[in-house]
């Protein structure tokens, strides 16, 4: 028998994945920031982090923060506002609002990286 993935399962998995990604980012961020005490090391690290790959990863960070935060509000609505019967509709609203916020937020990253014109 094949299991059908529905919105609740997707919300569960995406929330966990974004949470793990944010935890990993936080650990890496603390490590990088702790290595910036030396001015020469600072310039080297900043040059490394200014590569296009890291601009894409910053958009990924934005996506994780936005989705995780909005889905967390969805979970609270289900738990505390008796929204269980409309949880699927709320999930699709969370995805739509997340997509809009990520797109709007990605524009400054891409402009700064030179991908989009000024």
Image (cartoon, rainbow, N blue to C red):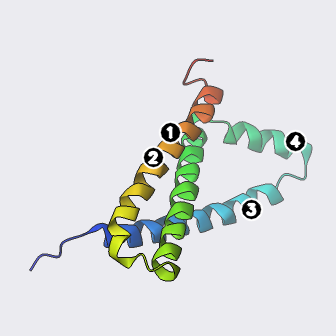
Q: Residues within 10 Å of mark 1 (few under 14, many from 20)?
A: some
Instruction: Label 3, secondary structure: give it.
Output: helix
Cα separation, mark 3 vs mark 1, equals 29 Å
Nearer the observer: mark 4 or 1; the answer is: 1
Cα separation, mark 4 vs mark 3, equals 17 Å
On residue 99, the disc is: 2
**Residue 10 placement (x, y as % from top left):** 34, 67
The residue closer to the viewer here, 88 or 6, is: 88
Q: Residues within 10 Å of mark 2 (few under 14, many from 20)?
A: some
Q: Are marks 2 and 1 in contact (CB under 8 Å)?
A: yes
Relative side of 21 to 39, left or right: left
Counting residues from the N terminus, which is met first, the one under dot 2 or under dot 4? 4
Residue at (50% x, 73% y) in the render: 77
- To which quarter of the image does residue 11 belong? bottom left
**Circle 3 sits on which residue?**
31
On residue 40, the disc is: 4
Instruction: Label 2, secondary structure: give it.
Output: helix
**Circle 1 sits on which residue?**
103
Counting residues from the N terminus, which is met first, the one under dot 4 or under dot 1? 4
Q: Is residue 19 above or below residue 80?
A: above
């Amino acid at each position: 028998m094949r299991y059908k993935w529905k919105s609740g399962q997707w919300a569960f998995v995406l929330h966990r994945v974004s949470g793990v990604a944010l935890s990993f980012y936080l650990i890496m961020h603390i490590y990088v920031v702790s290595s910036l005490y030396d001015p020469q090391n600072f310039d080297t690290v900043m040059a490394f982090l200014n590569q296009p790959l890291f601009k894409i990863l910053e958009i990924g960070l934005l996506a994780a923060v936005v989705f995780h935060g909005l889905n967390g509000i969805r979970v609270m609505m289900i738990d505390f506002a008796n929204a269980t019967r409309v949880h699927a509709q709320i999930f699709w609203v969370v995805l739509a609002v997340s997509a809009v916020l990520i797109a709007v937020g990605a524009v400054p990253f891409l402009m700064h990286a030179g991908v989009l014109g000024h």
